[in-house]
Amino acid sequence: MGTQQILLIVLSVIIVGVAIAVGISMFNSQAYNSNKTAIASDAQSFAAQVIQYYKTPVSQGGAGGTIAANGEVAMSGFLGFDTTNFNITNDNGTYTLAIVDANTVTITGLGTAKNGANQNPQIVATITLPAGTIASVASDV
């Protein structure tokens, strides 16, 4: 084999290696963004269920328009969360319920995917009652 053919083979191997590395990086980035979107969707769904619980009469298993000081147990039961540590886990991540005060509830979702900096996506959905507004903030932890 001539020198020119050996150089072409080496160059081809380098190009294929770079293409594979870029492909893996793009796949990991897409998986991370997909996980972030999924936990945001789940957090929004849980937040809507919190509003539903808040507006449901007590006689039907809801809060009746007021959140008790220890309402996390009842709210967790209504949402299907664990009633001892107020969280739930699915394929997308782990979600934690917290009652901040009589008018504010937060749901924090921590995703399972990792980005290039070895961080997980996190979504914090804040529900303001009785208005029923939901505000979500995304971050990496």
Image (tube, rainbow, N blue to C red):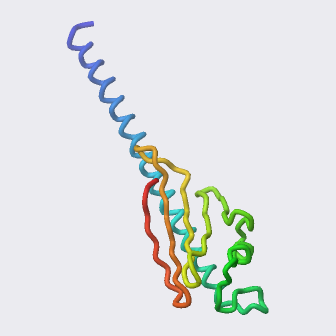
State the residue lying farthest toward the front.
69
Q: Residue at x 48, y 63 (%)?
A: 37
Q: Is residue 55 above or below residue 21?
A: below
Between 12 and 55, the one nearer to me in the picture: 55
Residue 104, x across and y down, in percent: 54, 80
Between 19 and 135, the one nearer to me in the picture: 135
State the residue lying farthest toward the right.
59
Q: Residue at x 43, y 60 (%)?
A: 139
Q: Residue at x 79, y 92 (%)?
A: 59
> Image quadrant for the N terminus?
top left
Q: Is residue 131 left or right of residue 19?
A: right
State the residue lying farthest toward the left.
4
Q: Is residue 122 above or below residue 136?
A: above
Q: For residue 75, what is the image quadrant?
A: bottom right
Residue 63, x across and y down, in percent: 69, 87
> What is the count of numbered marks?
0
Residue 16, x across and y down, in percent: 35, 29
Q: Residue at x 30, y 29 (%)?
A: 15
Residue 30, x across and y down, in percent: 44, 52
Between 107 and 31, the one nearer to me in the picture: 107
State the residue lying farthest toward the top.
1
Q: Is residue 74 above or below residue 30?
A: below
